[in-house]
Amino acid sequence: MTQRVFLLVGTRKGAFILESDGARRDWALRGPFCETWPTNHVVADPASGTIYAGGGNEWFGPAVWKSTDFGASWSHSSQGLAYEAGQTPVKAVWSLAVGAEGRLYAGVEPAGLFVSDDGGTNWSHVEALQQHPTRPEWNPGGAGLILHSLVLDPRDNGRIWVGISAAGVFATEDGGASWEPRNRGTRADFLPEGQNYPEFGQCVHCLVRAPGGGARLYQQNHCGMYRSDDGGRRWESIEEGLPSSFGFPAAVHPRDPDSLYLIPLNGDIKGRFMPGGNTAVWRTRDGGSSWQAGRAGLPQGDAYFNVLRQAMATDTLEPAGVYFGTNAGALYGSIDEGDTWTCLAPYLPTITSVETLVMER
Amino acid sequence: MGEHVPSQAPSEMRAPVLVRLPPHLVVLFPDAEPRVALQAGSVAEMVAALDRLWPGMGARLCDETPAIRRHVNVFVDGRRARLSTALAPGTDVFIITAISGG
């Protein structure tokens, strides 16, 4: 095999990296990195292999960590990763994404978007998002008022979708100069009867874009699972056939826009566990019309854990690998597109994020 | 909200203040030392001096309020200080991570 395959794992106590070759059968674990800071998201620039980790420390504030040698050494910065004087301070970085030409984006708590054109050393605030007229009415979700989903167009830095809990999905077509909410068709069951389809204020949990560069998006919401075929302007429910309408992560297939992976939990007021204590990753191959549960190799019975919103990912290999980490610190992987699963690391800290990186040797 | 930082006489002539840094902070900056003597007439000046020595350290200690971060305690003469707290020549300053932060 000629590839190096990396799993980038964010946890409550630092970042970890697992490495294998293209066979993906044996994994070597390294970490913890980032001085065991709470790390919400670890991503990589697939062009350069540079790894970025975003998080926040209760003592020392937010930071983006960077490694250009696959985790052997790290630096950190938060230069410019701050609101104007007098604003509620930035508490933590929640999401990272690498756009066209290596531009780096960071979503933070309280919800806002920052951008870096020098690889994460200096940051500037995308002010127009916070200046949106709906901003005074944004309410925090259970994890705070966080910008947790960052969906980019790898060829065009003008198009960005963000998911904010609990303000909903917002999008820009002009590089962040102007934003519009895109939540039509998604429910807010937590609002009074008759007000359940607002323009904004939905509790989006995870927003992902189907491969191929088209307009298809998927989202796992606090209140349902959805597909959009027009860039989020209109959403359709795809929750029929799933064991609940509640969950956190969503992951797309690297090549098939009709394939999606979800991990429904038993419900938002029932403990947020695996339904019936039985672990399953649910897969659709027809855009959400039908669903199949993958359970082989996953804990069945008494599985009282959950999977957080950024803690599932796919790789780019053939067949695609699928990976997820639990709040109980176990990391699972499948190298047959979700049919069978193996525990790759059983005893990590609470896993906040999982991403992949494949490098040709 | 922000604090008023009193103007000081030129501090170059004063005896330095001795600053003790917490180990969790020192480890973030490869060449940082746990004890440093520097010229500063106030806590704000001390933070600025630390940031000149080790760029980025100021943002680890202060947020954009501006204020000392919520879970960082700066003790001057045995009392919790603010950015505006004056530092007499030769003062011992202890920067300590609060137990409330972890």
Image (cartoon, grey):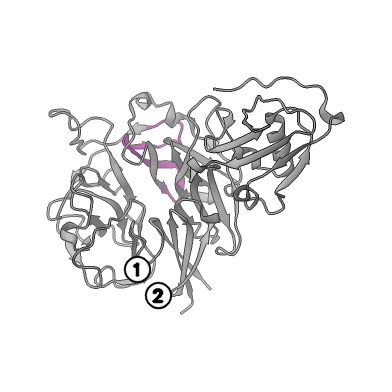
Q: Residue at x 22, y 42 (%)?
A: A235
> Is the residue marked by circle 1 packed among few (<14), some (14-19), or many (20+) residues within 10 Å?
many
Give the image location of residue A114, x and y in percent.
50, 39
Residue A122 percent coordinates (x, y): 60, 42
> For residue A195, which numbered disc appears in the image?
none
Question: Could you tell me the amino acid type at mark 1?
Answer: Gly
Q: Is residue B70 above or below residue A219?
A: above
Residue under numbered circle 2:
A24
Vertical arrangement, residue B92 with respect to residue A220, above or below: above
What residue lies at 68% left-to-right and 54% top-to-bottom? B30
Query: Is A202 on the left-hand or right-hand side of A80?
Result: left
Q: Outermost residue, bottom direction?
A: A1
The residue sitting at the right extreme is B13
Q: Does A198 sit above or below residue A338?
A: above
Q: Chain of mark 1?
A: A
Residue nearest the viewer, comparing B9 with A162: B9
| Side of A66 where A231 appears, left or right | left
Q: Which residue is mark 1?
A: A321
Within-10-Å neighbours for mark 2: few <14, some 14–19, many 20+: some
Amino acid type at mark 2: Arg
Q: Residue at x 83, y 25 (%)?
A: B10
In what element is the residue under mark 2? loop
Residue A291 appearing in the image: no
Q: Is residue A160 magenta?
A: yes
Chain of residue at mark 2: A
Q: Are marks 2 and 1 in contact (CB under 8 Å)?
A: yes
Position in image of residue A333 (x %, y %) = 34, 68
Estimate the x, y position of residue B16 in percent, counting from the top left. Answer: 81, 35
> Range of the magenta residues?
A152-179
